[in-house]
Image (cartoon, rainbow, N blue to C red):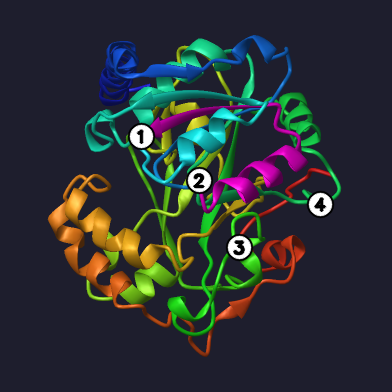
Amino acid sequence: MDMRELARAYRLRWKRRRLLFRALRKRRQLRSVIDRSAQIRPQQILVASTVRNEIVRLPYFLEHHRRLGAGHFLFVDNDSTDGTGDFLKEQPDVSLWFTQDSYRLSRFGMDWLTWLLMRYGHGHWCLTLDADEIFIYPHHDTRPLSALTEWLEQSGRQSFGALMLDMYPKGRLSEHSYAPGDDPFEALCWFDGDNYWATRKPDLQNLWIQGGVRARAFFADRPRRAPTMSKAPLVKWNRRYAYVSSTHSLLPRRLNHVFDTLGGEVASGILLHSKFLPVVLERSVEEKHRREHFANSRLYDSYYDSLSADPDLWCESSTKLISWSQLEAMGLMSKGNWL
């Protein structure tokens, strides 16, 4: 290792310590609503999420991840006003915390979740998700999540990558209805299959994937500003770990080696993204006003304006979702040498 690399490793080690210290400080912003963490058993898979006004998405989110085998859910409610907190409080496998503090100033919720993962996730496989993300992986319809994590451990892997796949309907967003608990991907059944590009970040060594419908429809004139689609949501957690940028990258940086860049195949999954349910129309107006979701929020004003204008995101090259094996055949996820 040359001197430049040694210096970089030293800086990243201190960065991780600063992130962990931030999480320790930010824990004071959390108020426990209901703490069922005593129910957590060894080997249980945990799900962690920060949510705000997600009463529409949460019934299906919980049902899906319970079906995969998640054992306990750690939620931070960031000042919801739509009944999200009351709904979560009644769920028997949920521990819930509440805060009115800034989502943006908590590193978009990651300071809060880092504390909860540090406190409750140590030694567990933990799935860190947004409420509009539904995690799938090869054979998820027949093999529980515990089978995947057991194989990852046997393979010496501590993290698992996933491409966030923006799903959208055919026609304007407002033309489609959705009721809580329904499968959102009955209507949001289309996606962009081939307009993705990737760069390797030299410092954190993570693969930075961009593209998809949001790059095509909202960032065509500035593609490098398009949202990042690559994540590492599933990690065998250690209290010394920390997410750096949402779940796009972690420290220690070895945890970011979740995609192969040398022509081979590393098993990976998909986060089906339900952002484009009809609720996004009014939420876009609200989020533009709140300015809590992007570090340089004003740069995204046109993005929010385009969303609130009720777009039709479908095009002739859109692909209809059929199955996970279709996504694997297209190279959007991989089973590698699993099964």
Amino acid on which the number 1 mark rests in the picture: Asn
Q: CA distance from mark 1 to mark 4?
A: 32 Å
Q: Which residue is mark 2?
A: 131
Amino acid on which the number 2 mark rests in the picture: Ala
Q: Which residues are magenta?
A: 55-78
**Dot placed on the residue nearer the N-terminal end, 4 or 3:** 4
Image point (57%, 66%), residue name: 178
Q: Position of residue 314 (x, y in %)?
A: 48, 83
Find out whether the residues at labels 4 and 3 contact each other: C-beta distance under 8 Å. no
Quick one: SS at disc 1?
strand
Q: Position of residue 81 (x, y in %)?
A: 36, 42
Label annotation for residue 141: 4
Horizontal arrangement in the rendering, residue 133 relative to residue 305 (left or right): right
Viewer-nearest of discs 2 and 1: 1
Viewer-nearest of discs 4 and 3: 3
**Dot placed on the residue nearer the N-terminal end, 1 or 4:** 1
- Please tell me how crowded label 3 is: few (under 14), some (14-19), or many (20+) other residues with Cα within 10 Å: many
**Dot placed on the residue nearer the N-terminal end, 2 or 1:** 1
Q: CA distance from mark 4 to mark 2?
A: 20 Å
Q: Quick check: 21 above or below 327? A: above
Which of the 4 quarters of the picture holds residue 253?
top left
Viewer-nearest of discs 1 and 4: 1
